[in-house]
Amino acid sequence: MSLKFMRYLRSASVGLLAVLFMVPSNAGAASFVAAEDFFLTRQETLADNLYLAAGRSSIDGQVLGDLLAAGGAVTVSGSVRDDAHIIGGNVGVYGVVGGDLRLVGGQTVLGGRVGGDVVAAGGQLHLLGNAVVTGDLYIAGGEVVLDGTVRGNVMMAGGKLILNGSVFGDVSGKLGEALVVGDAAVVSGNISYSAPREALIPDTATVGGRVAYETRVIRKPDIPSAAPLFGVIALVTSLKFLALLGVVLVLVLLARRWSESVVHAAFGSFWRSLGMGLLVLLVGPIVVVLLLMSFIGTYVGVLAGALYVSILILSRALAAVLAGALLARWLSKNKALRVAPWWSVGGIVALQILDFVPVLGWLATCLLVIAAAGVLLHQSLEKLHAR
């Protein structure tokens, strides 16, 4: 019975991903792409929404709908008629976005025209001199250089804001480092900000309203006794470990061949797996919302949401198997990827340790979970093709 149950669970998970990603193509106009690289040339026009996950992607043509793109490097030099949502390590938008623009990236450059608002988060953001934002600009990041034009307001929470361009509205921010106002900066409205030190505004700069500065002092909060908190953390960590251990042992002992196929597929084509996994994480919730809003009914949407969460849980368990396989390659004599109970338990321990390592640890865990989800999607598409 256990072996049959595992086969059913495996098929159900793969089949569910297939269903989730087939629904939008039938319910509305949308194109889904998951690949190592993707290029939309200047001569090409896509007459619907584009949901894209790739290691490297370049949009030089026209997208007559929304754009949702994720990957290592994303460049948009063409046009997007409606909204654009982009997540990537290096993001460059040099074309035209007719609606709102949402950006999450390590290094982000905006050198085009946006018809709505821009919401950006990341390490560094640079608005080039020819960049025009018709709406408001909302930023959360380390350093922002604004050389372009914002016709609305600018609101920032982060490190350093450098103003060299033009803002037709107000500028406000909570800055951990500083506000720097360039010689040619133009702010038609007010400037209100908090920072460790006050900005020097050159005489050649133009500020139409008032300037309000507040000293930002970082105070250490009063910390109560840590014993109860540590107790709760220990209990939650133990429960997570036991739950993950149970799922992983079932996968390794009862579905070992499938687990091995997931490991080899993930590391054999890591960027493809990562791109497709991002597609699962980004598009899955959208599909669930579409189902909830469609004629199919609320119950189907709720069921799809519950199954989507189940896929995320399965991806977390498979991430532990992937981590164990990496440990086997690094520590064993034959340096091969292996799936075995003891290595998988070591993978669970490794993930638990990474959970307590800020940024880098969380990033490593996320990459493994995303890659596992990408393999599940790839397997679902292969099964559909085979049928």
Image (spheres, helix red, strand yellow):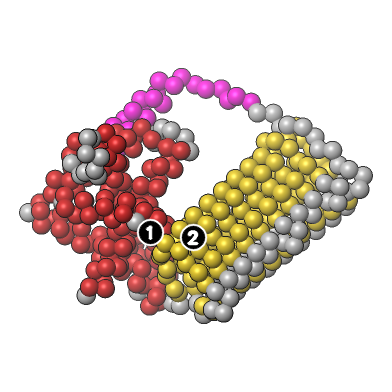
Circle 1: is it few (<14), some (14-19), or many (20+) Cα within 10 Å? many
- Residues in magenta? 219-241
Q: Give x and y (percent) for residue 116.
A: 66, 65
Give the SS element for disc 2.
strand
Which residue in the structure is indicated by mark 2? 56
Q: Is residue 266 above or below residue 330?
A: below
Which residue in the structure is indicated by mark 1? 272
Q: Give x and y (percent) for residue 384.
A: 26, 72
Q: Main secondary structure of the magenta part?
A: helix
Label 2 vs 1, first from the N-terminus: 2
Q: Give x and y (percent) for residue 335.
A: 25, 40
Q: CA distance from mark 2 to mark 1?
A: 10 Å
Residue at x 46%, y 38% (from the top left corner):
360
Position of residue 98 in the picture relative to residue 186 (left or right): left
Of the pair 69 and 170, the residue shown nearer to us? 69
Disc assigned to residue 305: none
Res 351 seen here:
yes
Give the SS element for disc 1.
helix
Residue at x 54%, y 79% (from the top left corner):
45
Which three-letter amino acid code belongs to the residue tagged 1?
Arg
